[in-house]
C-alpha cells in the first residue's frame, strides 16, 4: 500500500485533503463515519484474558500510554510523546507477529534495544504472551486458527520447508484470530444488526450504510435524522459482544 498508495485516500498533505473534498453526500444528507476504538487490542485482551490489558481498558486509560509506562518503567504522568509512539508500534507489532528485526526497523532503534522492549513487553503482559505462543503452537499442529466465533482460517505455509514462507505463515496465524474476530466477525455482525434496525424503523430512505473500512462503517444519513439515529447505531456496534463473552 505504498509507492503509490492506491488503497487509501490521501490526508497528510494539503493536496491530499483537497482530494477528499470530492467525496460529498447527497443534498440534505451527511457522511457519517463511526469506528471502533482500538478494537484489535481490545479483542486481544478478550481472547488472551490478560488481566493487565483488560484493566487498562476497563479503567478507560490510554492503552499506548499505559503500555509505555509498563515497558519503560516510568509513572504514567512521565510518559512522553516518543515513549507513547514506541509503545504503539510495539502494541500493534505484537498483534501482527512482529519479531525483533521488524520491530527494530519500525522503532528506528538498535536490535538490542528492540529485544529489550520486546522482553519487557512480554514480562508485563505475560498472559498475552502465553496466548500468542499457544495460538502459534496450535496452528502448527492443526494447520488452522479460529476466531472467537469459530471461523477457521487455514495456513498451508506452516508446512513449508522454506523458512521465510513458514515464518510469514506463523505471523499471519498469530494475527488471524484477533483481526478475524475484530474486523471480520464483529463488524459484520454489527452491519447485520444495523441493517435490521434500519428496516425495522423504516429508515431505508434516510439512512444508508455505504462502506466498511477495516474497523469503520461509513453512512449517508439525512441531516434531520443524525441526532436520533447515530446513538442507536453506536449502541448496536458496542453491544455485539456480551459481557459473558
Image: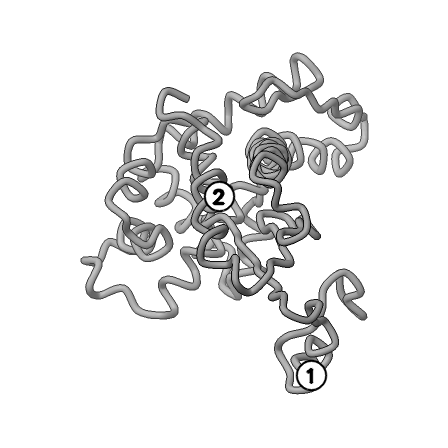
184 left or right of 71?
Answer: right
Give residue 39's mark: 2
Q: Determine if residue 38 is in view.
A: yes
2 or 1: tag closer to the N-terminus? 1
User: On the image, which quarter does residue 180 sit in?
Assistant: top right
Image position of 164 with respect to 218: above or below? above
Q: Is residue 22 left or right of residue 213?
A: right
Q: Looking at the image, which is closer to me, 241 or 204?
A: 204
Residue 71 vertical position relative to residue 122 in the rendered view, above or below = below
What secondary structure is marked by label 1? helix
Q: How is the image coloured?
A: one colour
Q: How many marks?
A: 2
Q: Residue at x 49, y 64 (%)?
A: 109
Which residue position is annotated with label 1? Answer: 18
- Name the residue: 49% across, 56% down: 89
Q: Residue at x 57, y 60 (%)?
A: 32
Say which of 163 and 240 sits in front: 240
Marks 2, 1: nearer the viewer: 1
Q: Position of residue 153 (x, y in %)?
A: 71, 24
From the viewer's side, name the closer residue of 49 and 69. 49
Amino acid at each position: 500500500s505504498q509507492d503509490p498508495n492506491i488503497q487509501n485516500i490521501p490526508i497528510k498533505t494539503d493536496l491530499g485533503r483537497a482530494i477528499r473534498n470530492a467525496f460529498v453526500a447527497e443534498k440534505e444528507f451527511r457522511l457519517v463515519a463511526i469506528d471502533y476504538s482500538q478494537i484489535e487490542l481490545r479483542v486481544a485482551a478478550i481472547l488472551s484474558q490478560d488481566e493487565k490489558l483488560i484493566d487498562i481498558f476497563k479503567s478507560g486509560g490510554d492503552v499506548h500510554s499505559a503500555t509505555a509506562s509498563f515497558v519503560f518503567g516510568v509513572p504514567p504522568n512521565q510518559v512522553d510523546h516518543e515513549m507513547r509512539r514506541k509503545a504503539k508500534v510495539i502494541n500493534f507489532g505484537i498483534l501482527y507477529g512482529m519479531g525483533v528485526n521488524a520491530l527494530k526497523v519500525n522503532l528506528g532503534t538498535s536490535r538490542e534495544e528492540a529485544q529489550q522492549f520486546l522482553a519487557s513487553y512480554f514480562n508485563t503482559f505475560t498472559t498475552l504472551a502465553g496466548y500468542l505462543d499457544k495460538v502459534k503452537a496450535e496452528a502448527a499442529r492443526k494447520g488452522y486458527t479460529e476466531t472467537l466465533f469459530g471461523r477457521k482460517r487455514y495456513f498451508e505455509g506452516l508446512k513449508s520447508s522454506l523458512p521465510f514462507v513458514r515464518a510469514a505463515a506463523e505471523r499471519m496465524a498469530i494475527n488471524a484470530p484477533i483481526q478475524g474476530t475484530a474486523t471480520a466477525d464483529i463488524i459484520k455482525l454489527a452491519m447485520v444488526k444495523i441493517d435490521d434496525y434500519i428496516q425495522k424503523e423504516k429508515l431505508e430512505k434516510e439512512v444508508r450504510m455505504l462502506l466498511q473500512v477495516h474497523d469503520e462503517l461509513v453512512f449517508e444519513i439525512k441531516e434531520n435524522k443524525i441526532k436520533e439515529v447515530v446513538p442507536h447505531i453506536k449502541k448496536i456496534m458496542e453491544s455485539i459482544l456480551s459481557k459473558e463473552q
